[in-house]
Amino acid sequence: MAVLLLVVLGVCPVEAQSSELIPSETESNIMRHADNSFNRQAYLYAVKLYSRIIIKQPDNQQVLLRLADCYRLLRDPRNAVNWYSKAFAKVYPNRPEHLYHYAAVLSTSGKFQQALTWYSRYLEVNPSDPRALAAIESLKNPEQLWDSNVEVELIPIEFPGPVFSPAMYS
């Protein structure tokens, strides 16, 4: 009996992890698992799943926004900008918060003029949001975001032996 089981397992192709623990390959199942991964903050795994959907549905704005949000939360502004721009190419999102996030990743990417435009569009919907107002104010003079007059000096501290991650406390 054990020999028969070994022969069957040896002959049958086994694809471990090929479906990433998704019982069936329907798009609704993939979407459900992607959303669950996103909600569990497993953004990298969610990106893999959403990417499978976007291949078949390249204009699905919900998936485009989720991909953008995943990359934003993974602190990858370059990819986040890419997916937000695809999502906003035809239609603005239902949630204005996406406008704010798009402006923020544009700002992080150094695209200050575009960020100002999107913060302004966000303020059309949420005119009193202090985050956007502060961001616009700081982006009016982006060179002030990085103060070039900062000097860094080494502090001559000697310790009697090797030190790992020294920190001062009282």
Image: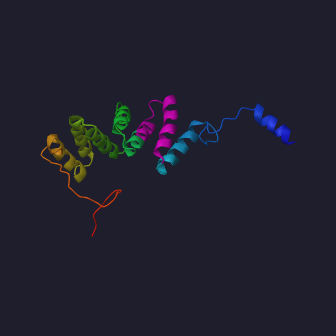
Quarter of the image that includes the C terminus: bottom left
> Relative to residue 148, is residue 109 drawn left or right?
right
Q: Is residue 62 magenta?
A: yes
Question: Where does the image place residue 79, in percent across and percent down from the top left?
Answer: 37, 35
Which of the 4 quarters of the picture holds residue 85? top left
Q: Could you tell me which residue is drawn at 21 percent across and 39 percent down?
A: 116
Residue at the farthest bottom position: 170
* Total count of labels: 0
Indicate whether residue 11 is drawn in magenta.
no
Residue at the right extreme?
1
Image: magenta residue range: 42-67
Which residue is farthest left?
149
Q: Is residue 39 left or right of residue 160?
A: right
Q: Quadrant of the N terminus?
A: top right
Seen at 50% across and 37% down, the residue is 48
| Quarter occupied by residue 88 | top left
State whether residue 129 appears in this view.
no
Q: Is residue 121 above or below residue 86?
A: below
Q: How is the image coloured?
A: rainbow
User: Can you give x and y, in whole percent of width and height, for residue 6 in the image?
Assistant: 80, 38
Relative image position of residue 65 (x, y in whole percent) = 40, 39
Q: Main secondary structure of the magenta part?
A: helix
Residue drawn at x 36%, y 36% is: 84
Q: Position of residue 111 (x, y in %)?
A: 24, 35
| Residue 122 visible, this orientation | yes
Horizontal side of residue 64 vs 17, given as left or right: left
